[in-house]
Amino acid sequence: MLPQRKSPVHTPPSRGWSGPVIVYLTVCTKDRKPLLAREAAHLLLRDAWAAADGWLVGRYVIMPDHLHLFCAPGSHEHPDLGKWVQFRKTVVSSRWMAPQEQPIWQHSFWDSQLRSSESYEDKWEYVRNNPVRKGFCTDPEQWNHQGTMNVLPW
């Protein structure tokens, strides 16, 4: 039997691919508490992403207990992805509107670098349909907790 990994391996993004650096990121709440799919949390997350400019947030979907987003370096000298995610989590936690809901975040996160425009579009279709698969809406356009902060062209 193979050993189970207890936390994800975060390899640094590589510029060696034929396209730009775009990373698909998933972050979960602590114990999968359903805290995120509300307007105040959505605005707080957007503010935190805007404040942490080392990485640019592109398309995103916020679910009750996790979020998916696509991000790309803001410059060639981008910070470590893990440090950027931690900064973002800290900003959101420090401004969270309901202190009794702390801690907000699971310790780590899941990430993968996209390698082609097809994988970007395929992954986005999967992500944007997540609320439909979970029964929160019948059309992904009905889900209010999604958007695009920056265009991340392939």
Image (cartoon, rainbow, N blue to C red):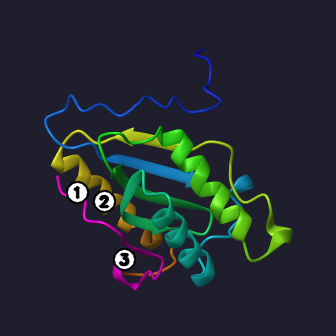
| Residue receiving disc 2 | 124
Q: Position of residue 48 (x, y in %)?
A: 54, 65
Above or below, 99 against 39 in this view is above
In the depicted structure, whether residue 84 falls above or below residue 50: above
Q: Main secondary structure of the magenta part?
A: loop
Label 2 close to label 1 by CB (< 8 Å)? yes
Q: Magenta segment, which residues?
A: 140-154
How many C-alpha atoms fall within 10 Å of the one at disc 3: few (<14), some, or many (≥20)? some
Q: Residue 140 carries which label?
A: 3
In this rendering, the count of numbered labels is: 3
Amino acid type for the residue under numbered disc 3: Pro
Tell me the residue that label 1 is attached to: 121
Q: Label 2, secondary structure: give it.
A: helix
* Residue 52, position as x, y percentages in the image: 49, 58
At x 25%, y 52%, the residue is 120
Instruction: Say which element carries label 1.
Output: helix
